[in-house]
Image: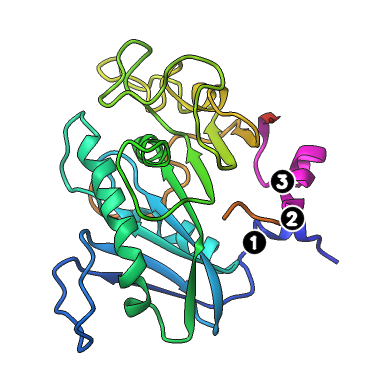
Amino acid sequence: MESTSSSIFKFGRHGVKLFGVESNAAASSADSYTPPPKPLLIASPCEEGDYAVVLFLHGYLLYNSFYSQLFQHVASHGFVVIGPQLYSISGPDATEEIKSAGDVTDWLIDGLSHVLPTQVRPILSKLSIAGHSRGGKVAFGLALGYTESRLKFSALMGIDPVDGMDKGKQTPPPILTHVPHSFDLKVPVMVVGSGLGEIRRNPLFPPCAPKGVSHKEFFDECGSPSCYFVAKEYGHADMLDDETKGLGEWPRDNKFLMAIRDDPEIAPVELSTIAFL
């Protein structure tokens, strides 16, 4: 019989509905409904029930649709996953992205239930935030209070988060302080890094996840409880869909994390770093 700790790497027991919500969509017949401030890609379980919510922020110059397989996998395990499209084109400053992510978070309070299947009830007291690449930086910025939000997050996850081009070349607003355990987050944190993201592939451009401003530094500034994994043979974009178009609350049952710590071989990738605080 397959253990619960290893089964999380396979599609879960819930059927999943994947759908988009436009920011300029016509208001529903309910006068209280207001469209979201940014377009959304949502993956929701199909079965009736109460589900925790994950807000996932995309990487730099990427589309939320590039994560559709990841969204559906997470939703199949009993989560409502929401991926806003924060922008189409953006410069180095992520300040507006953090504000936009905060606006989407506030919209969830009154708007989310209007767009989900009627039998699906979101539990906003169990709202987690996650982000990939620059989206990881934005997720940390929002969790650290760089903009105000009416909702509180119960957990934070950074997937190969990036805070600039190099140490000393952070993009605004800088998130990393380079002071160990300096983040005042008050929520459990998971940081997942890629082993190949720090490798320069082109002499004209920095690595996707440069040393000094990426996953190791983000974890080093977290307090307890937090955990850290590095997928040794994975690159910075390997969590995206196999084919993409265009340009390129913390789980109360944490047995699967403890199982990976105690037996890393159950993970479907080789983990070169495993750390817990």
Q: Magenta stretch: give its range.
A: 253-272
What residue is shown with label 1? 10
Tags 1 and 3 touching, CB below 8 Å: no
Q: Which residue is mark 3?
A: 257
**Mark 1 or 3, closer to the camera:** 3
Residue 22, position as x, y percentages in the image:
20, 68
Q: In the displayed structure, would residue 201 be above or below residue 24?
A: above
- Judged left or right of residue 51, residue 175 is left
- Tell me whether circle 1 and circle 2 mark residues in contact (CB < 8 Å): yes
Quadrant in the picture for the C terminus: top right
What residue is drawn where x is 54% and y is 51%? Answer: 154
Say which of marks 3 and 2 sits in front: 3
The answer to which quarter of the image holds residue 165 is top left
The question of residue 258 being in magenta is answered with yes
Which residue is at the far bottom?
29
Front-most of residues 237 and 84:
84
